[in-house]
Image (cartoon, helix red, strand yellow):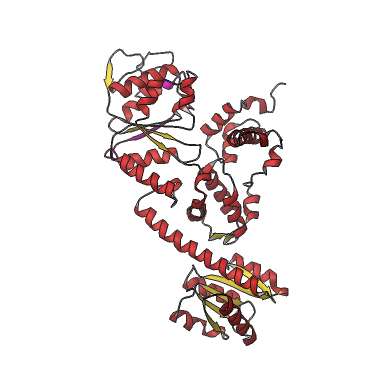
Amino acid sequence: MSSILALDDEHDMLALLSRIVSEKSSHELTTLSDPQELTQLLEQKSFDVVLTDLKMPGRSGIQVLEEVKQKNPRTAVIIMTAYGTIESALQATRKGAFDYITKPFRKERILHVIEQALNWQKLQQENSYLRQKLEEKTILPMLVGYTPIMQSLSDQIEKVAKTSATVLITGDSGTGKELVARALHTQSARSAQQFIPIDCSTIPESIIESELFGHVKGAFTGAIRNKKGLVEEANHGTLFLDEIGDLNPSTQVKLLRLLQEGEYKVVGSNSISKTDIRFIAATNQNLAEMIKKGAFREDLFYRLNGINIRLPSLVERKEDIPLLVSHFLDKYNGLYDKRVKRISNELMRDMIGRDWPGNVRELEHTIERGVIMASGECLEFSDIAAAGAVPRAPQEIGQSCELFSMPFKEAKDALIDKFHSEYISRVLSRNEGNVSKAARESGLKRQYLHRLMRETRLDSKTFKKNHPD
């Protein structure tokens, strides 16, 4: 049974609230006509929901709100106000009130708001409990979640981490593949050694072998001294090969030998070096399809795919969004010294309703920009819009009857491709082809922006101010 406190200096209003709550619900209602007695009452009893009038002699509803929240931040406070003071009630919601109700009100309205407040409080309690459990399991930020698919993933990571098995992590961009790789390393027997990540999509083909295996002085033009490779640096630790699908065929052959024999040659040297490395690879590409097209070696795939860990997209675990939002609010409140305690119901419904093509990374950037723009304790839809974080509706991206006659996955991929192309074109245009500035503005890693540019066949030179037609 939930406990509710109704605070109003008008006895008729308290009697009305008592009848409404007792007729339609099983909640326990306490009434109080003198706001000066609130402090003593809060010492004796805690409440799930507090209904308070805004204008009362001796103590205002805002003061009641502040005292209740100081005593228990999770108590939901609902402000009751006359029509002429709606602006004050809106200010109260920015200070942490759950909602406001104008007088006179219909009983259906007050009961609906009370139930919403109780559901919100239940969610806060569940989030608090889950955050505690997640901290106990040292789950990393992008792996926050309590859905069965995430619990299964957590268990899989815990089991695999204790071995030295080669792991292939698959999943869409933004699902946290590198975080999983780091979790596998930090929970392994190699955690005291180096974790060395390398993004195969960002290193030019001409120097990828030198980066991986190192080179000796004079091995090629510009090799003025010996260089240690990442493989040597990762010895006894973990080497993480991100975007393994972008590795060129020549390097694939040498990587296969390294995986099979634990041996490699430094570029420009004839001597064989040995290493002891735990390999983790990741990709958002379909390697099986690449094998059919001859773009990826089948024998290398089977070596890498010792254990496969697939990361779900955010659409597959939308139930985790409230917990993720809470986590990112805490993170960016601390980073930017803000006090955003919650998000509006409207915004939460929007968050849960979106497709999130950029997955958890996109959600995190959206919350970060919203926290920066927020002026109160409640993050509103307008804050997200002001930060430029509201994606346009699909019909604004491009309506096409053809899309709706295609299979769902093909239509979705076509729409996302169109969005990527138009979004990147605009952000590059605004920054006159400067990729670094475009990456900062869009909240993307420079390497990821480069990869999207390749996929959409966009050249930064096209957007430079003095580029010839």
**Residue visible at 61% across and 25% down in the picture:** 457
**Residue visible at 62% across and 27% down in the picture:** 460
Q: Magenta includes 193?
A: yes
Q: Quadrant of the C terminus?
A: top right
Left or right of residue 180, residue 83 in this image: right
User: For the magenta stretch, what is the residue range?
Assistant: 188-209
The spot of residue 102 in percent (x, y) is: 68, 73
Does 405 appear above or below 57?
A: above
Query: Quadrant location of residue 96?
Result: bottom right
The spot of residue 275 in percent (x, y) is: 27, 25
- Asked whether residue 209 appears in the rendered view, the answer is no
Query: Quadrant location of residue 311?
Result: top left
The spot of residue 277 in percent (x, y) is: 30, 30
Q: Magenta includes 206?
A: yes
Which one is nearer the viewer's eye here, 74 or 308? 308
Label the magenta part by its dominant secondary structure. Answer: loop
Number of marks drawn: 0
Query: Quadrant location of residue 130?
Result: bottom left
**Residue visible at 69% across and 25% down in the picture:** 466
**Residue visible at 41% across and 13% down in the picture:** 220
- Asked whether residue 411 appears in the rendered view, the answer is yes
Does 31 appear above or below 175?
A: below
The spot of residue 168 in percent (x, y) is: 39, 32
